[in-house]
Image (tube, rainbow, N blue to C red):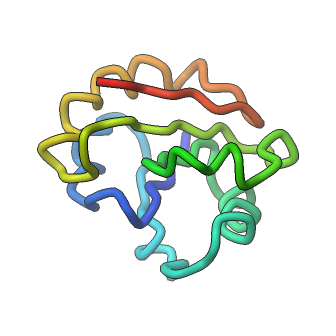
């Protein structure tokens, strides 16, 4: 399973997602690409898109994208705030459904 981390997530968070192939938006050369186009690119190479963008589901028609989306909700997007959510993320990755949004809160 291939996972893409949005550019608003600290790249070091990838180390917390053990057992999966994880890349970041900047690593893919997609920094600055807006959400609709970004999701279209991500669908071609990834199974799951992880973001902290709570508005994504209101801004995009997510069922049209063949990728599972996970929104991490933490007090901030700092590594310290996101790390406690990693176990919950790992627990749902294998059951994340493409075209749907899963929200993980602290």
- Residue 66, placed above or below residue 28: above
- Residue 93, placed above or below residue 3: above
Give the residue furthest to the right. Answer: 64
- Residue 44, placed above or below residue 27: above
Decide if residue 47 is on the left or right side of residue 94. Answer: right
Give the residue furthest to the left. Answer: 80
Decide if residue 98 is on the left or right side of residue 8. Answer: right
Decide if residue 48 is on the left or right side of residue 19. Answer: right
Residue at point 65%, 37% (across, down):
68
Give residue 40's quadrant in the image. Answer: bottom right
Q: Can you say which quadrant of the picture contains the C terminus?
A: top left
Give residue 1's quadrant in the image. Answer: top right
Residue at point 19%, 53% (across, down):
78
Percent across and percent down for residue 102 are 57, 27
Percent across and percent down for residue 96 are 61, 25
Count numbered badges in the picture.
0
Percent across and percent down for residue 45 are 66, 59
Decide if residue 12 is on the left or right side of residue 4. Answer: left
Q: Nearer the viewer, residue 65 or 27?
A: 65
- Residue 71, placed above or below residue 60: above
Residue at point 28%, 61% (across, down):
11
Percent across and percent down for residue 19 are 35, 34
Q: Nearer the viewer, residue 90 or 33?
A: 33
């Amino acid at each position: 399973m291939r996972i893409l981390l949005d550019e608003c997530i600290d790249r070091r968070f990838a180390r917390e997602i053990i057992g999966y192939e994880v890349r970041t938006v900047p690593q893919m050369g997609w920094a600055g690409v807006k959400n609709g186009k970004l999701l279209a690119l991500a669908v071609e190479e990834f199974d799951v898109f992880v973001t902290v963008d709570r508005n994504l589901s209101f801004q995009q028609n997510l069922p049209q994208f063949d990728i599972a989306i996970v929104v991490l909700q933490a007090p901030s997007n700092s590594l310290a705030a996101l790390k406690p959510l990693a176990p919950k993320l790992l627990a749902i990755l294998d059951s994340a459904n493409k075209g749907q949004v899963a929200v993980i809160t602290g």
